[in-house]
Image (tube, rainbow, N blue to C red):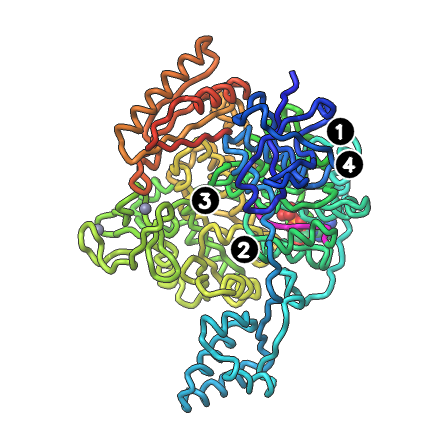
Amino acid sequence: MLKPYADVIIDITHTAVDRIFQYEIPEELSGQVSLGMKIRAPFGQGNRLQDGYIVGFSEKTDYDPLKIKKIASICEDSIPIEGQLICLAAWMKEHYGSTMIQALKTVLPVKRKVKTAQKRYLVRSAGEEECRELLSLYRKKNQKARVRFLEALLEDCVLPYEMVVQKLRVSPASFKAFLTEGVCRLETESSYRNPVKDNSPGGASVCLNQEQRRVVSGIWQAWEGDRKPCLLHGITGSGKTEVYMELIRHVIEKGKQAIVLIPEIALTWQTVMRFYRQFGDRVSIVHSRLSAGEKSDQMERARRGELDIMIGPRSALFTPFPDLGLVVIDEEHETAYKSETVPRYHAVDTAIERCRLAGAVAVLGSATPSASSYYKAQSGAYHFFQMKKRAREASALPAVEIVDLREELKAGNRGIFSRRLTELMEKTLGRGEQILLFLNRRGYAGFVSCRSCGKAVKCPHCDVSLKAHRDGTLKCHYCGYEIPIPKRCPSCGSGYIAGFGTQKVEALVRAMFPKAGILRMDMDTTAKKGSYDAILSAFADGKADILIGTQMIVKGHDFPKVTLVGILAADLSLYSGGYEAGERTFSLLTQAAGRAGRDRLPGHVVIQSYSPDHYSVEAAASQDYEGFYWHEILYRKLLCYPPVYRMLSLLITSKEEETALHMAGLVKKQAEAVNEDGILELVGPAKASVSKINDMYRYTFYAKCEEKEPLLELMGQLEALSWDKGVLYQFDME
Ligand code: ADP
Ligand code: ZN
Ligand code: ZN
C-alpha cells in the first residue's frame, strides 16, 4: 500500500536538517513521489511555498490529520545531487541503525550560510638567513611582538593574517615595516585556495604494461556493462595506482567525475601528489585538518563542476559531484574505512551503494583484500582482477624467513634481535645498502608503561590506557582526561617509565652498529610539522643506513636501496582482540615485507615471531594471500563470523552497572522471543572488551545470521523496547 505521508526536510542547510516535517501526499501526486525527490510545500505561518526534499514515508502522522499540510508540487528538474545523497542517507540509516538526522548530517555537506571574508595570509619572501639576522636584531632591541612574528615566520612560511593579529598579538603596525621592506607579503585566499600545493612540473604518464592494460579493459567492460563493483587484488608495487589513474582518465573523457578514497592523508601523501601531477588543479582533497569552511569550499567547487577528482578519507565519499562515474577505494582492507561515530558506516559498502545510486562503478584495490571483499569476489558479487607482477621490470619479490623467538631464548639470546637478523644486518651494512626495522605495535603505540612493574598508565574513568601526545601529555581518547606524562610510575613509583619501544630499539642498534646512520620515526620524532616528510626524504636520499619505526614506515613508500626488512615483534597484533586480528596481522606483515627490494637489488625479510606457525605469519612470509584467505574464511565459517555470517552487535551503556545489566537481560529475552525458529545465533550479553568508558559501564550483545533481513527485523524489535532513561544503546551491523 502507498503510504500517505511524506517526511520532508525544508532547505538543506546544516541547522534546518535538525527537523523533519510531515506532509500529506495529495492524491494526484500519489505514486509519483519517491525518496530524495525535490518538492515544493507550504511552510511556516504564512504558508509560503518552499523547496524541500522527501527523506522518508510514513503510514501514520503525529499531527492532526485534518490540519496537516499538503505537498504542493513536484519540482520538475531532474533528480538533483542532493536527492541521491538523501537516498544514501536513508540507506545508511537502515543499515547502520542511526536516525535519519544523524545520517543526513553525515552525508550532506555543511553549507556556510554567510560568506566569510577573503582569508588573508602573510607569506615569507625573505630568505631564512635574513630573517634570522632580523630576529637577533629585534631580540637585542627587545621588541617582543616583532620577535614573535619573525619566529613564527621562520617556523611556517605562510601565516594566516587573523592568527598573527589575534593569537600572536602582533599588531599590523608592528609588521607594516616588514611588508614594505619585502620581508613578507600579503596574499589572499584565492592564491592559496586549493589545499593541494605542488610546484613540480606535470609528470609524464607511464606506459601501462600488459597486466595493467588487461585490468583496465576488464574494469572498463564492467563500467560499460553491469557496473558491479570490481575488486583489484594486486601485490604491492604492481602498479595499481597507475591503473586507477588510467580509469579516471576514461571517466573524465565521458564527462564524469571520480572520487578516490585513501585511508589517511598523511600516510599517502606521495599518492596524492601523483594524482595532482597528472590532473593538475582539477583535483582537490578533503581531510580532517581542513576547517569546516575550507571543506565546504571544496565541496562547493565539486558541485559547480570545477573539479573532476576528489581525494580524501572516508568523508570524501559524500562529495556532491553532479555526475559521478567512479569511486576508487585504495587499500580497501584498512580499518580506517569504518566510522567510529554514529552512523557507524563502512566506507566500502557505502561507496558501493553510492555508486549504485549514481550509476557509477566502485573499484576496490588492495595487496591484501579484506576477507569480506575477497569472499564477495569469490561468490560473484564483485568482478575480480589480479596483478601478480611488480610493475618495474627488474624488481623481484624478496626472500622471506621466519625466526622462532622461542628458539632464540632456548639458545640463551635474550635480546630483541635474533642471531639471523643480526647477521643479515651486518652483511647489508657491509654492502652499503639500507635497512628498515619495523616494530609491530599496532594498538600499543603511544601507551606509556612501566618497565619495572609492567603496568600501563590508565584512565581513572575508562578501562583503557592513556596515550602519549606530542605536547608531553597523556590523554584518554575516550573521555579526554589528560595529565602530564608522569616521571614516576603511578603504580609502583619506579622511574623506569617509558612508552616508545622504538627509542629502546634505536639505543640497542646504536650500541651494535656505532658507525651506522640511524633514523627513527615515531610520535616523538614526527611531532614537528613537516618532520615526517623530512625523515622519509633523508632516508630516501641515503642520509642514513637504518630506519626504525612503527606502521608509519610500512605504508606506501618506495625506498629503492632498502634490501633488508626486519620485523621485530610480528605477533603483537595477533592478540589485539576481535575476530579480525588474524587479518590485521597478515596485512601488516605482508606490507612490511613488501618494502624490501623494490628496485634492482634483491631483498631480504626477517620476521621474528613467538608464534611462527600461526597461519597469518606463515602466509605473510610466503606472500601467499590465497593460503591465508582459505584458512581465515574457514575460521570465520566455523565461528559464524562475517563475511560468512552477518552480525548485528548492540552496545548497551549506563552509569549504573545494574541498569545496564538489567537492560541487557531484557534485550536477551526479546531476542530469544524473536528467534523462535532458531535461525539467529545469539551471543551474550557480556562485558564489552573495553568495559567502562567515561564512567559508563558497557555491555555487548551479538546476533549472527546468514541473512541480513532477520537481523534488521531484530534491530527494529529491540529499538522498540522500552529503554530505561539512563541507558544508551548503539547498533552496529557487519
Ligand atoms: P601499487 O599502487 O600497486 O603499490 P604503484 O602504482 O605505486 O603500485 O607502482 C609502483 C611503482 O611502479 C611506481 O613507482 C610506479 O611509478 C611504477 N610503475 C607502475 N606502473 C608502471 C609501468 N607500467 N611502467 C613503469 N613503471 C610503472
Ligand atoms: Zn611500575
Ligand atoms: Zn577516560
Query: Can residue 37 be seen?
Result: yes
Up/down of 237 relative to 615, above or below: below
Q: Which mark is in front, 4 or 3? A: 4
CA gap, disc 4 and disc 3 = 63 Å
- Residue that carries the numbered disc 4 in the rendered image: 76
**Callout 2: CB less than 8 Å from ligand 1:** no
Q: What's the residue type where badge 2 is placed?
A: Ala
Q: Earlier in the sequence, mark 1 or mark 3?
A: 1
Q: Read off the magenta span.
A: 307-314
- Kindly indicate whether the residue at mark 3 contacts the one at mark 2 (C-beta within 8 angstroms): no
Task: Look at the numbered disc 3 and give the secondary structure of its residue.
Answer: strand
CA gap, disc 2 and disc 3 = 26 Å
Q: What's the residue type where badge 4 is placed?
A: Glu
CA gap, disc 1 and disc 4 = 29 Å
Q: Which mark is in front, 1 or 3? A: 1
Residue lying farthest to the top in this orientation? 677
CA gap, disc 1 and disc 3 = 43 Å
Q: Which mark is in front, 4 or 2? A: 4
Q: Position of residue 715 (x, y in %)?
A: 47, 23
Near mark 3 (Cα within 10 A), the count class, few <14, some 14-19 or many ≥20, is many
Up/down of 449 relative to 472, above or below: above
- Residue that carries the numbered disc 3 in the rendered image: 607
Q: Which mark is in front, 1 or 4? A: 4
Q: Position of residue 154 (x, y in %)?
A: 51, 76
Up/down of 173 relative to 498, above or below: below
CA gap, disc 2 and disc 1 = 35 Å
Q: Earlier in the sequence, mark 4 or mark 2?
A: 4
